Image (cartoon, rainbow, N blue to C red):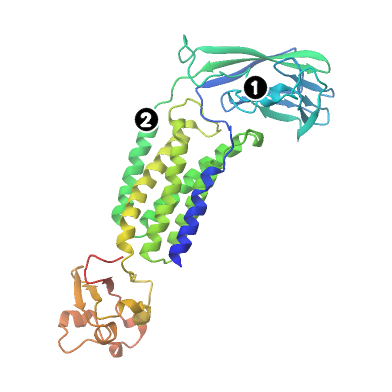
């Protein structure tokens, strides 16, 4: 049952990367700025979002005339009404060209710039953001003949405000590449913290994964809330760390078997590693589509991914070993219920039971006989040192008087345990 539950949970979680916007704002090396609005119209403002990914226009309610954004062929493209309604002209070829950043889409036959406008409502509130190819560099390669720090583009976005022409002047600058020092330090910190968690074992792996997932979730939500909804922020920015956090917490808040706990660590680690891989381009680009400090975004991305990789590899290595038996935790089961808690298939003459002597911390074989005849009551041949830490049930005046030795169950081998 547990295996089927873990398999279903894993499939549901790893399917999250397929849910994402087709052309969301991503890391870039270019920053677009609005230089001027000529003539100046009170109540109209514009800005670039995500460096140069989207162009946003806001028309306040104080502007009591209709504002039209002119398309690439001089046709009406967007309409901002005095009541705050924003609509697009479905007959404008600009609508279809602006569907992706590089403008690779081909307008359909009915997109005619000379035809009468066919308006479709997009939003209310007098604000909208869209890909405007006049405001950003239209290639995936850097411009030839330029270097970081150069202004590579100057353009104008034309408007009609109450029938009067208004120009928004913009310029795009090539920004220098970011420093690699924060990401390098984050990788070393994630490696060290993951190694410590693997060395300590127990719940340490789940705890550090939960911490990393919470940090990643904060960064993902910060990014999502930094851009307008119409820009399509990717769901993976917060869905992957959110599921990783839930799985990691599920693995540490309940007393699962070691096999189930290791499987939960593996599932959570996989989510964080995928999250980091999807954000890898942000380590090389100068500008990220978030209001968070760029260095903090990169530090959390690298640190969480490296830590998850270390803990995930350790969990994957332990799962086959843990699947061979069931560990009885010291404090998970009261001493007087040990016998009832032993799985039936382990209470056989073939099972070898081990007890760690409290004074030596060494695992010692007890007997290959069944639990009922050997473990519960010491015999006359029981050594005094072991009798002291292993009294008979009749000698205990109360459950609190019983010792709490640590048991280890193996299948004919002290190394096959979990």
Crowdedness of circle 2 by 10 Å Cα count: few (<14), some, many (20+)? few
Q: Is residue 58 left or right of residue 3?
A: right
Per the image, label 1 sits on a secondary structure element best described as loop
Q: Is residue 55 left or right of residue 210?
A: right
Residue 365: percent from left, percent from top: 19, 74
Query: Along the line of sight, which residue is nearer the eye, 269 or 221?
Result: 269
Please give the label number shown on residue 179.
none
Q: Look at the picture and state if 406 lies above or below 40.
A: below
Q: Residue at x 43, y 25 (%)?
A: 178
Q: Look at the picture and state if 367 lies above or below 272.
A: below
Residue 166: percent from left, percent from top: 75, 14
Give the image quarter of residue 99: top right
Residue 353 shows up from this direction: yes
Give the image quarter of residue 342: bottom left
Point out the tag, 2 or 1, that comes first from the N-terminus. 1
Residue 313: percent from left, percent from top: 33, 50
Residue 201 shows up from this direction: no
Tell me how far mark 2 sits from mark 1, CA to CA: 34 Å
Q: Look at the picture and state if 291 lies above or below 239.
A: above
- Residue occupied by mark 1: 132
Query: Along the line of sight, which residue is nearer the eye, 392 or 76?
Result: 76
- Image quadrant for the C terminus? bottom left
The answer to whether marks 2 and 1 mark residues whose Cβ atoms lie closer than 8 Å is no
- Residue occupied by mark 2: 181
Crowdedness of circle 1 by 10 Å Cα count: few (<14), some, many (20+)? many
Q: Look at the picture and state if 93 lies above or below 212.
A: above
Residue 72: percent from left, percent from top: 69, 16
Query: Along the line of sight, which residue is nearer the eye, 293 or 312?
Result: 312
Per the image, label 2 sits on a secondary structure element best described as helix
């Amino acid at each position: 049952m547990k295996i089927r539950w873990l398999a279903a949970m894993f499939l549901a979680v790893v399917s999250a990367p397929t849910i994402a916007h087709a052309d969301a704002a991503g890391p870039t090396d270019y920053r677009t700025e609005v230089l001027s609005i000529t003539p100046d119209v009170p109540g109209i403002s514009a800005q670039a979002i995500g460096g140069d990914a989207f162009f946003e226009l806001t028309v306040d309610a104080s502007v009591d005339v209709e504002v039209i954004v002119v398309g690439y062929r001089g046709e009406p493209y967007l309409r901002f009404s005095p009541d705050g309604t924003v609509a697009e002209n479905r007959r404008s070829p600009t609508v279809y060209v602006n569907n992706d950043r590089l403008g690779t889409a081909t307008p359909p036959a009915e997109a005619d710039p000379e035809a009468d406008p066919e308006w479709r409502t997009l939003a209310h509130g007098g604000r909208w953001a869209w890909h405007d190819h006049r405001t950003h560099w239209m290639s995936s390669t850097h411009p030839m003949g330029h270097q970081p720090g150069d202004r590579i583009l100057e353009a104008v976005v034309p408007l009609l405000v109450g029938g009067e022409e208004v120009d928004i002047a913009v310029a795009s600058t090539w920004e220098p590449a970011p420093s690699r020092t924060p990401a390098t330090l984050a990788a070393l910190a994630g490696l060290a913290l993951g190694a410590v968690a693997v060395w300590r074992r127990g719940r340490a792996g789940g705890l550090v994964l939960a911490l990393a997932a919470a940090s990643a979730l904060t960064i993902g939500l910060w990014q999502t809330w930094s851009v307008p909804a119409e820009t399509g922020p990717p769901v993976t920015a917060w869905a992957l760390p959110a599921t990783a956090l839930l799985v990691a917490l599920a693995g540490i808040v309940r007393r699962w078997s070691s096999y189930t706990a290791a499987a939960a660590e593996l599932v959570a680690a996989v989510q964080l590693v995928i999250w980091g891989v999807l954000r890898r381009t942000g380590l090389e680009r100068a500008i990220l589509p978030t209001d968070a400090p760029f260095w903090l975004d990169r530090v959390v991305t690298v640190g969480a991914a490296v830590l998850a990789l270390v803990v995930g590899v350790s969990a994957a290595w332990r799962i086959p070993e843990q699947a061979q038996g069931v560990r009885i935790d010291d404090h998970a089961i009261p001493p007087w219920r040990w016998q009832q808690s032993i799985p039936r298939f382990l209470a056989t003459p073939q099972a070898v039971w081990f007890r760690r002597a409290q004074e030596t911390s060494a695992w010692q074989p007890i007997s290959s006989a069944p639990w009922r005849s050997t473990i519960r009551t010491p015999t006359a041949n029981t050594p005094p040192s072991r009798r002291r830490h292993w009294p008979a049930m009749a000698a205990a005046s109360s459950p609190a008087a019983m010792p709490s030795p640590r048991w280890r169950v193996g299948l004919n081998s002290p190394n096959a345990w979990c």
